[in-house]
Image (tube, grey):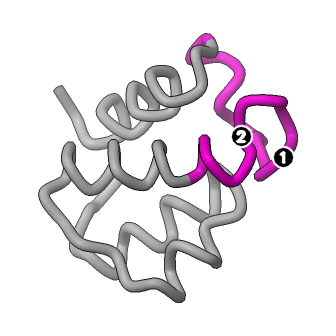
Amino acid sequence: MTNIEKYIQSFTAAFDIEAEQCEGLEYQGIETWDSVGHMGLIAELEDVFDIMMDTDDIIDFSSFEKGKEILGKYDVEF
């Protein structure tokens, strides 16, 4: 499985959405991406990519696209 597939799967698992809904998705753009859902997504991503994100990066993780940029800091390439 590629990194982008893992990334999309993390969103679909955390928010119970279809893969097609990920592109353009933003924090609080759907009901399930609230503060609790956000931490679930972060935990999922940290587990899948075997990383530990800094607090500032967790706070800045505000959209599907921004998340890819942030994960790049942790050597996750898409």
**Where does residue 61 sit, x and y in percent of width and height?**
61, 67
For the residue pair 67 and 34, the one nearer the viewer reads as: 34
User: Is disc 1 surrounded by few (<14), some (14 to 19) or many (20+) residues within 10 Å?
Assistant: some
Could you tell me the amino acid type at mark 2? Trp
Q: Earlier in the sequence, mark 1 or mark 2?
A: 1
Looking at the rendering, in which quadrant would you find the N terminus? top left
User: Is disc 2 surrounded by few (<14), some (14 to 19) or many (20+) residues within 10 Å?
Assistant: many
**Where does residue 42 sit, x and y in percent of width and height?**
43, 54
Asked if the residues shown at circle 1 and circle 2 are in contact, with their CB atoms under 8 angstroms apart, the answer is: yes
Label disc, if present, on residue 33 of the rendered structure: 2
Label disc, if present, on residue 72 of the rendered structure: none
For the residue pair 55 and 7, the one nearer the viewer reads as: 55
Does residue 59 show up magenta in the picture?
no
Which residue lies at the image location 83% right of the left edge and 32% below the top edge? 30
Compared to 58, does 56 lie above or below? below
Instruction: Give the SS element for disc 1.
Output: loop
Compared to 44, does 68 lie above or below? below
1 displayed left or right of 8: left
Which residue lies at the image location 49% right of the left edge and 30% below the top edge? 14
Which residue lies at the image location 71% right of the left edge and 63% below the top edge? 62
Name the outermost residue toward the front: 36
The residue that mark 1 highlights is: 28
Quarter of image, res 17: top right
C-alpha separation, residue under disc 1 versus residue under disc 2: 5 Å
51 displayed left or right of 65: left
Which range is magenta?
Answer: 18-38
Name the outermost residue toward the left: 50
Could you tell me the amino acid type at mark 1? Gln
